[in-house]
Amino acid sequence: RRYKVLFHNDDYTTMEFVIEVLQRFFHKTATEAMHIMLTVHKKGAAVACVTTRDVAETKTSQVMDYAQENGMPLLVTSEPE
């Protein structure tokens, strides 16, 4: 079973930070990262990737830790596809 990694919108995390995270942890191009970030901004959430449960949970944990270290309230979750 595959899992989605979802980014959720908030009023505090900067767009630049979301783009950085997408490039750093999900190996997105600048264009791909911008598209996902704008989808999160406009629709409230967007899928960053679809992968195995273990990878999805690891990525979610890594991103949440990184966001906390940088003082950002970014919420990233994983759920079954």
Image (spheres, rainbow, N blue to C red):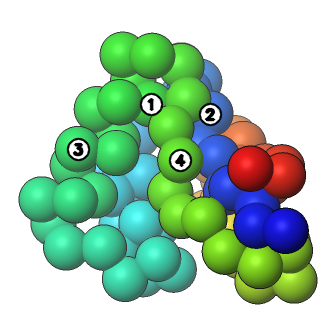
Placement of 15 over or under 66, stated as above or below: above
Q: Is residue 59 visible?
A: yes
Placement of 70 over or under 71, stated as above or below: below
Q: Say which amino acid is labelled 3.
A: His
Left or right? Give the position of 35 relative to 49. Answer: left
Mark 1 vs mark 4, CA separation in Å: 9 Å
Disc 3 marks which residue?
35
User: Mark 3 or 1 closer to N-term?
Assistant: 3
Q: Are marks 2 and 3 in contact (CB under 8 Å)?
A: no
Q: Secondary structure at mark 3?
A: helix
Disc 1 marks which residue?
40
Q: Are marks 1 and 4 in contact (CB under 8 Å)?
A: no
Disc 4 marks which residue?
47
Q: Secondary structure at mark 4?
A: strand
- Name the one closer to the observer, 75 or 45: 45
User: Mark 2 or 3 closer to N-term?
Assistant: 2
User: Mark 4 or 3 closer to N-term?
Assistant: 3
User: Mark 2 or 4 closer to N-term?
Assistant: 2
Q: Are marks 2 and 4 in contact (CB under 8 Å)?
A: no
Tag count: 4
Mark 2 vs mark 4, CA separation in Å: 9 Å
Residue at the left extreme, as displayed: 31
Disc 2 marks which residue?
8
Q: Say which amino acid is labelled 4.
A: Val
